[in-house]
Image (cartoon, helix red, strand yellow):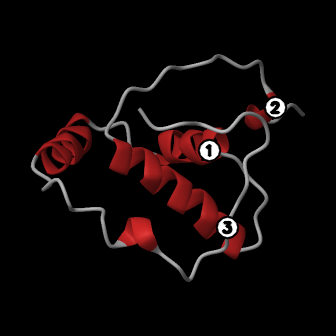
């Protein structure tokens, strides 16, 4: 039986605010705190596959995101209680 996470890959370019990118790193760190060895792409894939495919739900998520204040993720993005995780490969720089 082939598992979805092992299927052929497709690269996706995502252009989003820096705080959202930092939030993804925090989610990877949270997974590590739970004992998971994972990557940013696996966390994103897990979130996408868990999302309900219902127009009203997606619309509500979009509305909530679009109304968030610029500092909405600030507190979670500085979680000192989560372990550090080093990604393999090149270090991503901030623009």
Q: Which residue is mark 3?
A: 84
Of callouts 2 and 3, which one flags the residue occurring earlier in the amino acid sequence? 2
Residue drawn at 78 percent across, 24 percent down: 7
Q: Which secondary structure lies at badge 3?
A: loop
Which label number is shown at residue 6?
2
Q: Which residue is mark 1?
A: 40
- Residue 80 x/y as whole percent: 53, 79
Crowding at mark 1 (Cα within 10 Å: few <14, some 14-19, many 20+)? some
Residue ranking furthest to the bottom? 81
Q: Which secondary structure lies at badge 1?
A: helix
Crowding at mark 2 (Cα within 10 Å: few <14, some 14-19, many 20+)? few
Of callouts 1 and 2, which one flags the residue occurring earlier in the amino acid sequence? 2
Q: In the rendered view, would you say 41 is above or below 34?
A: above
Are the residues tagged 2 and 3 within 8 Å (C-beta)? no
Q: In the rendered view, would you say 34 is above or below 56?
A: below
Crowding at mark 3 (Cα within 10 Å: few <14, some 14-19, many 20+)? some
- Residue 94 x/y as whole percent: 46, 38
């Amino acid at each position: 039986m082939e598992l979805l996470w092992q299927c052929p890959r497709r690269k996706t370019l995502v252009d989003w605010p820096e705080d959202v990118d930092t939030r993804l790193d925090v989610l990877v760190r949270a997974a590590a705190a739970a004992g998971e060895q994972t990557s940013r792409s696996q966390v994103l894939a897990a979130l996408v596959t868990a999302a309900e495919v219902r127009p009203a739900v997606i619309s509500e998520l979009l509305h909530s995101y679009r109304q968030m204040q610029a500092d909405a993720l600030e507190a979670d993005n500085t979680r000192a209680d989560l372990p550090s995780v080093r990604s393999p490969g090149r270090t991503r720089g901030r623009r």
